[in-house]
């Protein structure tokens, strides 16, 4: 093995510039492959981050606008959901498990001491927090006692806390929102993509203060179980639409009257999109790497041509074709793996550097927040796949030159360049 490595080193030293330029093309190819894979991973993580920890088996239902007349009602009528629709879901659909509802109220000025800002109020039921994956940083969310006793409690986000309570001590403090005073009982990790903070209050309290205790709700969110196929989910949505259509008096075939957002379908769509992106990235990256592999193959062909007489002498002294093949393939794999490993390390380092800067970048709080691109680092399986690609590339690059060297006849090799 030592003699083999010494022979390879001697060959590389004779063609230092050519070997370096060829190796650089391999390093650049694997570097770009890692960068592309990391960027695709960052986009995927950003999309999942924006979705938050929403229950995958959850469905959100909202009222829309009718697009056709029905049973004496004109079209372009606003469909509103009510408390009775929650009871229908609980009692008539055995697939439904957890249920929550929300009602949105007008924006109001929130003030504490001399600090103030504009916030949006959302009346919510307790289970919304677990279904939506809302992360509570401190304190708690709305509970059943808040609903039953019409408590004036509020859960604010971290941005609101930073503005109104610079000292970070908001729990238990009175917060004036509009003409009402609430007690802060929780702080949650806000959605950085919202342009206006949302404060959650008990649904019963919000209705009593802002909508004359109206039973209207803006959205219903619930989880389902036992629906394992697309056909089962479509059938459930069809039954749900028909039942609510009968209750709220709209045409069951009117697709704009009821908006149903199925998180299962959202996750499937995102998975398919990023699966396609990953496939595209691998194709582009491997295409770039192929350029370097062709370069390695060419340099090995030149090496075989220059060492034809040497191979003839080896054969005359009893060397087997397999030993010559091993020599060529080993040199090819070493060149490809060494420079490819350098490119891979540099690519991983760049992605780690980008991730380091993103993690320390202060949130902008706007729609162009960097949450669209999060954690572009690569996991061990991707790095292992890239390493396997390197080894295979070296074998592919050296196969043709090695096969050509092994087929040389001893007498022809000895006469070469004579």
Image: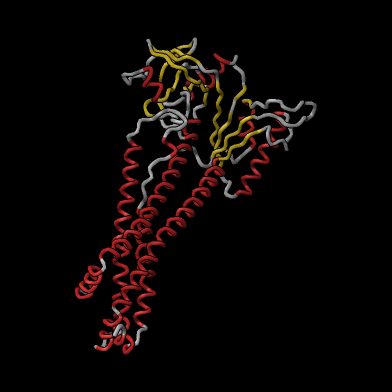
Quarter of the figure that contains the C terminus: bottom left
User: x and y percent of residue 150 in the render?
Assistant: 51, 17
Depicted 240 relative to depicted 126: above or below: below
158 or 211: nearer the eye? Answer: 158
- Name the residue located 35 percent from the left edge and 71 percent from the top edge: 398
Q: Residue furthest right?
A: 72
128 or 355: nearer the eye? Answer: 355
- Name the residue located 51 percent from the left edge and 52 percent from the top edge: 276
**Residue 256 figure quarter:** top right
Quarter of the figure that contains the N terminus: bottom left
Depicted 170 relative to depicted 341: above or below: above
- Name the residue located 77 percent from the left edge and 30 percent from the top edge: 70
193 or 411: nearer the eye? Answer: 411
Depicted 228 relative to depicted 363: above or below: below
User: x and y percent of residue 24 in the render?
Assistant: 32, 59
Left or right: residue 320 versus residue 284 is left
Q: Residue furthest front?
A: 418
Q: How is the image coloured?
A: secondary structure
User: x and y percent of residue 53 in the render?
Assistant: 46, 38
**Residue 181 figure quarter:** top left
User: x and y percent of residue 189 in the render?
Assistant: 40, 29
Depicted 109 relative to depicted 126: above or below: above
Count of marks, rendered view: 0
374 or 415: nearer the eye? Answer: 415
């Amino acid at each position: 093995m030592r003699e083999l490595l010494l022979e390879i080193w001697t060959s590389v030293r004779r063609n230092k510039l050519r070997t370096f330029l060829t190796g650089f093309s391999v390093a650049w190819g694997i570097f770009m492959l890692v960068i592309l894979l990391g960027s695709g991973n960052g986009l995927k993580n950003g999309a999942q981050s924006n979705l938050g920890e929403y229950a995958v088996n959850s469905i959100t239902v909202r009222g829309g606008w009718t697009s056709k007349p029905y049973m004496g009602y004109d079209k372009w009528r606003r469909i509103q959901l009510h408390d009775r629709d929650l009871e229908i879901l609980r009692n008539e659909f055995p697939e439904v498990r957890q249920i929550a509802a929300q009602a949105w109220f007008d924006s109001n000025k929130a003030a504490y001491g001399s600090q103030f800002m504009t916030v949006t109020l959302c009346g919510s039921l307790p289970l919304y927090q677990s279904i939506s994956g809302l992360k509570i940083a401190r304190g708690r969310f709305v509970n059943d006692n808040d609903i039953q006793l019409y408590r004036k409690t509020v859960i604010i986000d971290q941005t609101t806390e930073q503005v109104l309570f610079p000292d970070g001590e908001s729990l238990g403090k009175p917060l004036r929102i509009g003409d009402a005073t609430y007690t802060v009982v929780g702080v949650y990790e806000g959605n950085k993509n919202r342009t206006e903070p949302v404060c959650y209050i008990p649904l019963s309290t919000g209705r009593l203060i802002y909508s004359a205790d109206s039973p209207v709700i803006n959205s219903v969110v619930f989880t389902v179980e036992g629906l394992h196929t697309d056909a089962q989910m479509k059938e459930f949505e069809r039954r749900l639409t028909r039942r609510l259509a009968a209750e709220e008096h709209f045409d069951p075939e009117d697709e704009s009257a009821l908006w149903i957002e199925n998180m299962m379908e959202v996750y499937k769509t995102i998975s398919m999109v990023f699966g396609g992106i990953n496939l595209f990235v691998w194709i582009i990256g491997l295409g770039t790497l192929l350029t370097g592999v062709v370069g390695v193959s060419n340099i090995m062909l030149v090496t075989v041509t220059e060492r034809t007489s040497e191979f003839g002498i080896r054969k005359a002294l009893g060397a087997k074709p397999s030993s010559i093949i091993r020599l060529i393939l080993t040199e090819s794999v070493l060149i490809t793996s060494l420079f490819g490993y350098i490119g891979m390390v540099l690519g991983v380092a760049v992605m780690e550097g980008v991730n380091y800067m993103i993690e320390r970048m202060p949130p902008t709080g706007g729609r162009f927040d960097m949450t669209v691109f999060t954690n572009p680092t690569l996991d061990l399986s991707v790095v292992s796949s890239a390493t396997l690609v390197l080894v295979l590339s070296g074998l592919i690059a050296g196969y043709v030159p090695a096969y050509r060297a092994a087929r040389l006849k001893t007498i022809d090799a000895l006469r070469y360049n004579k």
